[in-house]
Image (cartoon, rainbow, N blue to C red):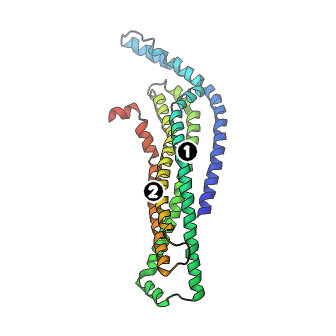
Amino acid sequence: MLMLNSSMAALAASLSQQLMQVKELAQEYVAALAVPAQLLCGLFAFIYIGVGLWGQWARGQKIDFYGLLRPFAVGLVVLFFSGFVALLGLSIYPIELATKSLNSAVQTNYQQAQQEYQQASNTMRNAMAAYQRTQVEQEELDVDQVTTEAEQGGNYLQLFKTSVHLLVSFSSLVLTGMVYFFRIFVVLATIVLSLIGPFAFALSLLPGFENNIRNWMVHYLRIAMYVPLSLLVSFVVAVLFSGCVYPYFTKLITALPSANYTFAHYETAQNVGFSIQLITLLFNCIAIALYACIPTFSTWIIRSESKANAK
């Protein structure tokens, strides 16, 4: 399972790099797709101005020339859409830069605590394996004790421990997948929004589509917020594991002898290992829940005017 996790991480990292190249290539197509969007914007501008003039004349109102300048403003945005998207991204960049610095500051402690835990865990496993080999060689296993334990439900307990171990491996795999899923999703969603953006802006000139620009900007900013929010969740997870989980596990493991196990030491090591599995499963579930709530957190930060007024 560890090999599967590392393979998945390497594959996702390679895929994210390829997607970044696709994103750069898509920027060229944004400029190409902006040309028909400009033509549509010009056509819809006539409709917008005509409907506006006719409505004001029909109601006997004064002509609002400033309101009729909207098609020209939208046309300028469509004409320089790549610059508009870059300017919009600058509003999120300081937050992303701050969260990236915050996350990188705790990664050193996280990696160090993880390394110390791995070393202590390997020492405990080697000591347990040496004890098992000694018992097999000396044939000192208590057959009656093993039989009684099996009759009292030891098989069910072993099945439960195995299930917990599999759940821990599966939760670690899901956690790794969610980390790279958000990275890949942000790139793909940004590409799609950048490609359809000029047409969404042009359609905003038609009656009934006035909210297109606002909706597009809300969606773009929400997607852009996924990156700093993912970094914040990674920061929280790293703090939890480096400050609570790994030091506590390392303390429990180092309290055991590194050699010359007795049956009591072996039984304690088994209980410690099972406790580690349960606590790891709990914290993995917390981390998965935090990553799953990233879209909700983004919605809390970036809300459209209509939803804000409704609340």
**Residue 220 location, x and y as percent?**
51, 35
| 298 vs 74, nearest the viewer | 298
Q: Crowdedness of circle 1 by 10 Å Cα count: few (<14), some, many (20+)?
A: some
Name the mark on residue 230.
none
Quadrant the C terminus occupies: top left
Quadrant the N terminus occupies: bottom right
**Residue 147 location, x and y as percent?**
46, 88
Residue beneath the point at 44% across and 84% down = 149
Residue beneath the point at 59% across and 78% down = 130
The amino acid marked with disc number 1 is: Ser
Q: Quadrant of residue 140 in the image? A: bottom right
Q: Give the residue pinned by disc 2.
A: 244
Secondary structure under tag 1 reads helix
The amino acid marked with disc number 2 is: Cys
Q: Is residue 40 above or below residue 292?
A: above
Q: Is residue 295 above or below residue 220?
A: below
Q: Is residue 198 visible?
A: no
Q: Is residue 203 visible?
A: yes
N-terminal label among 1 and 2 = 1
Q: Is residue 23 left or right of residue 280?
A: right
Q: Is residue 281 above or below residue 15?
A: below
**Residue 27 location, x and y as percent?**
64, 33
| 21 vs 202, nearest the viewer | 21
Residue beneath the point at 43% across and 43% down = 297
Q: Is residue 258 above or below residue 299?
A: below
Q: Quadrant of residue 298 in the image? A: top left
Q: Crowdedness of circle 2 by 10 Å Cα count: few (<14), some, many (20+)?
A: few
Q: Is residue 132 left or right of residue 267?
A: right
Q: Residue furthest bottom?
A: 144
Q: Give the residue pinned by disc 1.
A: 104
| 305 vs 92, nearest the viewer | 92
Secondary structure under tag 2 reads helix
